[in-house]
Amino acid sequence: QVQLVESGGGSVQVGGSLSLSCAASGRTFSNNAMAWFRQAPGKDREFVAALRWSTSTRSYADSVKGRFTISRDNAKNTLYLQMNSLKPEDTAGYYCTADNGFVLFAAASRYDYWGQGTQVTVSS
């Protein structure tokens, strides 16, 4: 059974940094797409960043380019999201997701596995 478990969320002031982790178990995603999405109250789930595990191909939403970095640790089967220069509009629940394929999609419906999420709150 595949499990994705996020950690690292919390509260931070504007301009601060947080690092999120997503530990995968039940299978390895050595050639698959993994991604981070976020969802604020009353809004749709929004693409943040995606990574193809084997090639390190990355994709970012325009709103986070230059501030967020997605990466992975193969040995730990763990996905990361380093978030710098945080803004109040980054406040949301952040969700890790993985796909059985390897194409980096920005649509949440294209992903097969989801974690429970971790909350990030940025205050001014």
Image (tube, rainbow, N blue to C red):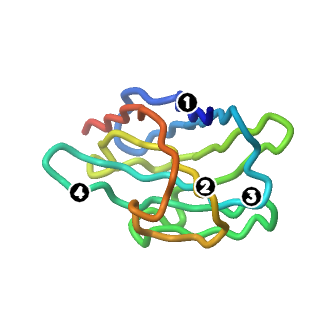
**Up/down of 31 relative to 11, above or below:** below
| Quarter placement of the N terminus | top right
Q: For numbered disc 3, what is the local secondary structure?
A: loop
Residues under numbered marks 3 and 2 in contact, where contact means CB atoms less than 8 Å apart: yes
Q: Residue at x 74, y 58 (%)?
A: 53
Q: Residue furthest front?
A: 1
Disc 1 crowd, CA 10 A, few/some/many (<14, 14-19, 20+):
some
Q: Which residue is mark 4?
A: 44
Q: Which residue is depicted at the point 80% across and 67% down?
A: 55
Residue 113 lies, in percent from the top left, at 52, 46
Q: Amino acid at mark 1?
A: Val
Residue 68's place in the image compared with 52, above or below, is: above
- Indicate the amino acid at tag 4: Asp
Q: Can you name the residue that lies furthest to the left here?
A: 42
Image coordinates for residue 27, horizontal then vertical, percent = 73, 40
The numbered mark at residue 5 is: 1
With 98 as the anchor, is 38 left or right in this view?
Answer: left
> Mark number for residue 34?
2
Provide the residue designation for mark 3.
53
Say if mark 4 contacts mark 1, CB within 8 Å: no
Mark pair 4, 2: CA separation: 19 Å
- Please state the horizontal and vertical placement of residue 76, each as a whole percent of the image: 80, 34
Residues at marks 3 and 1, CA–CA distance in whole angstroms: 17 Å
